[in-house]
Image (cartoon, grey):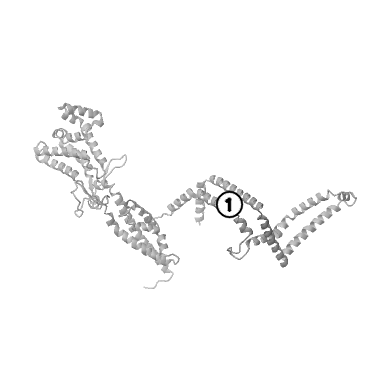
Amino acid sequence: MSPQLPSQQPSLNRRKNLWFERVMAIVALANLGLVLFDLSYVPLRNFWLLGKVKLPLLPTVTLPMPPAPEACKPLGETPDKATLITACYDRVKGIEAYRDTQAYLETVNQLEQQIQQNGLQSAATVQTLKSLQEQSERMISANWFTVANKSGTLEKIKDRMRDRLYVDNASVTARIVSTDPAKRSAFQEATQKKAKRSAQTAFALFWSPDYLTQAGVQQELKWFDTRIRDLMQTNYYRSIEENGEFTNNFWLLDAPFVILFAIEFLARTWYISRQFKSISWRDAIFWRWYDVLLFFPFGVLFYPWAWLRIIPVSIRLHQAHLIDLERLKEQATQGFVGSIAEELTEVVVVQVLNQVQQAIRQGEIVRWLLQPKTNQITVNNVDEITELVSLFIKLTVYQVLPKVQPDIEALLRHNIEAVLNQAPAYQTLKTVPGLKEVPTQLIDRLITEVIQATYSTLTTALEDPIGAELTNRLVQNFGQALGNEVQQQNVTDELKILIHDFLEELKLNYVKRSTEIDVQTLLEETRQLQQSAKKP
């Protein structure tokens, strides 16, 4: 095999890493599926047992469920019904058949055999019917469904039995109770008021030879199997541990995944710390914090929160390019930004302005600008204030003054003429024949000479080394003199008040303007800019 070129090695490493990421992501997804199945097993146990799905506005759909294998032996009493899933997974949750419910259904099975062999009027059959009447009374009074938290199932059984005796087969029931005046009166009242219907009386009548004979024994037994037996089969007993919680051996199934992901987490974070020299192993652990949820022992601690593993699983699937969460991440980020952008911006701006106001009140700004300390940190050993003033002077002399020279001349001409017009000699000179235009020419000449001399003096001072030094000294002395004057108590207090009030107005007006901005409009504009930037 020929050696790989250096340019091929990074590509090969990326493929290996992607392959490893996908394998671990699939394993994490399988573990998440097991977690979700375990969390939903008890609430959905009726479906795994009966395979019935009830959708709104649609008839009940029954799905075929695989039968229970011999390898999965149930705990406790043998259930009247079991499937592959319930027979195997009931042991994980400590679920076993409820003895009294199973005994009841076994008695019904015994009754069906006796009727086939000996008929309905035999002594053994009558004794079995009496036993069912007694068990029905105990089931209602003791509520056998309390342990499984299925009291609603018992109420459904009672309602179906009452409706069967007092509504569906009311004519048959009326003939049976017609010989007893007390029972006949109670039955008539029960047919008119639902609250008067007794579930114990309905069960007693249902398991009587007279009712089964007149209503049809096979028809009623079939009705019981389709309408009552399924509900009673869902009842169960669940053992309780010493800590008072229901038995849950999910940790046995979860332990291999926990060990695998713990080892993988340590190896992955160590590899990250070796790959990036600036990241320590501890920093790498914080970097991959979400992976901790994969090996956290939810089977022992905080079991109801095991669904949080969906977070690392989703991230791993995205990193392995098995699903694309980029769009979801963008929407979530934009939604988060949109919800807090206005408040966060206001808080930041107002906090900055508050800090500036506080610095002004305490005189820190003035001391920093006018009295720089020798121990202050500098970036380039340059006095920025002096350089800014020098730059401002050069900009004014070389760029600004030539452009505003006509305006300066017009202003000087106006002021000089205003002063001369008040002088009597100037007025007399203007009246002398032949000398009328002389004052105007003198003024123009004077202004031109003054401006040129001033501009020449400024440029010469800036270009001459000695003049530049004198200018810098002037700037420094000016700054020092200005600082000394500004530090006077009355001037400092007035500056603080003015700047403080200005910043307070700035805060109020900023908050007012920010409340008028539509955040959704800004987000839409941002999305359009991002889409435009992505286009080639």
Q: Which of 1 and 170 is in front in this view?
A: 170
The quadrant of the rendering that contains the N terminus is: bottom left
Residue reaching furthest to the bottom: 2
Q: Is residue 442 left or right of residue 50?
A: right
Structural crowding at the residue carrying mark 1, measured as other residues with C-alpha within 10 Å and reported as few (<14), some (14–19) or many (≥20): many
Image location (x, y in percent) of residue 268? 38, 63
**Residue identified by numbered label 1:** 357
Q: Is residue 507 left or right of residue 214?
A: right
Say what secondary structure mark 1 lies in.
helix
Q: What residue type is labelled 1?
A: Gln
Residue 259: in sight, yes or no?
A: yes
Image location (x, y in percent) of residue 178? 16, 27
Q: Which of 208 and 197 is in front in this view?
A: 197
* Quarter of the rendering containing residue 108: top left
Please tell me which residue is depicted at 25% across the width and 29% down the height of the picture: 193
* Quarter of the rendering containing residue 265: bottom left
Q: In this view, does 508 lie to the left or right of 457?
A: left
Check the image and report above or below for 72 versus 109.
below
Check the image and report above or below for 473 versus 164.
below
Q: Is residue 437 left or right of residue 527?
A: right
Please tell me which residue is depicted at 16% across the width and 38% down the height of the picture: 134
Image location (x, y in percent) of residue 72? 21, 53
